[in-house]
Amino acid sequence: MRKIWRLISAAFLGLVLLTCLSACGAKSVAEQDVLTTDQKTNRITWGVKADTRLFGLENIRTGKLEGFEIDLAKALTKKILGHNGKCTFVPVTSGTRVPLLKNGNIDAIMATMTITPEREKQVDFTHSYFDAGQSLLVKKGSPIKNIQDLNKPGKVILGVSGSNSVKNVAKFAPRARVLQLSDYAQAMTALKSKQGDALTTDNGILYGMAAENPHYEVVGGNFTKEPYGIAVNKNQNRFRKKLNLALDQVEKDGTYNRLLLKWFGHVKGFNYQEMKR
Ligand code: GLU
């Protein structure tokens, strides 16, 4: 008899526990208020590039990420959370950044991401913090001088999957074949091993590659406009507003221009003066 009672009470306890867990359990990603959580934990988790020199690149000696976007993320975090505010950096690629945001692995994306109407259906953006434009990287002495030179059957353009750049190729050079790699380090390796006639992405990223690879150059000017925005999940308006405010503050107090000078001031061919805010 005692055994039965024990069983019944254990089952009852289990049921109470289960009801409680579902009622007061973890909220779904869409329900969570990112700003409240970040203020409580004193930490913002950023999705950043780790393969993109000048913007976000892993320094293999220190294991630390370095670049304009890394510094900007640190500055914005301090504006939002105060001087002791901390950042966690999660490396993303052009293809993984939106899924990682949607799954709640990161709070915001600051990863050379162009604000496009298509992406605005999935995520919300802050106002633009960097005005890039799409261009081409080729081996010095290449007959390719612009995007029209690539619009021929047999031409191969290298790009990264999930990037806006590979989509734009369909508009500007529909006759070329696009070979999509999973990140920019791989795309550069493919260019060096002559798997394509040119590598395409935004000018700033390409200048970063050219700086490291002196036999390669940026050609063809900018044939698109790529304004970068910070992406956050839908329904995170409080967080987005704070980010916009923090962006305004770093632009006004000179931090933005200081970081621009630090990362782009000495890049050959890159007109950093034009980018000042
Ligand atoms: N800005 C472009 C994009 O958002 C290209 C750079 C990148 O792949 O992140 O897709």
Image (spheres, rainbow, N blue to C red):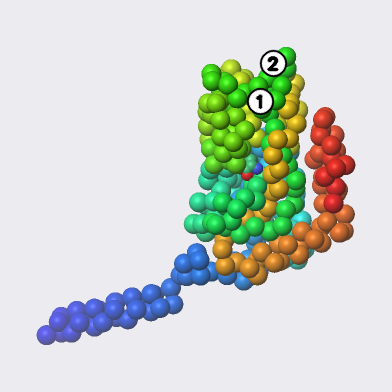
Query: Quarter of the image containing the N terminus?
Result: bottom left
Residue at 65%, 22% (x, y): give it: 149
Q: Quadrant of ligand 1?
A: top right
Residue at 56%, 48% (x, y): give it: 97
Q: Left or right: where does residue 254 sit relative to residue 220?
A: right
Task: Mark 2 or mark 1: name the one nearer the start of the chain.
Answer: 2
Residue of label 2: 142
| Beta carbon of the mark 1 residue lies under 8 A of ligand 1 | no
Task: Please name whichever residue, 115 or 151, is drawn nearer the observer in this view of the structure.
Answer: 151
Given the current orientation, which residue lies at the most extreme left position? Answer: 1
Residue of label 1: 148
**Image position, residue 198 (x, y; %):** 63, 24
**Quarter holding residue 193:** top right
Counting the numbered discs, the total is 2
Residue at 65%, 35% (x, y): give it: 201
**Quarter holding residue 269:** top right
Q: Is residue 183 visible?
A: no
The kind of residue on which mark 1 rests is Gln
For residue 69, above or below residue 84:
above
The alpha-carbon separation of the residues under discs 2 and 1 comes to: 14 Å
The kind of residue on which mark 2 rests is Ser
For residue 134, above or below residue 137:
below
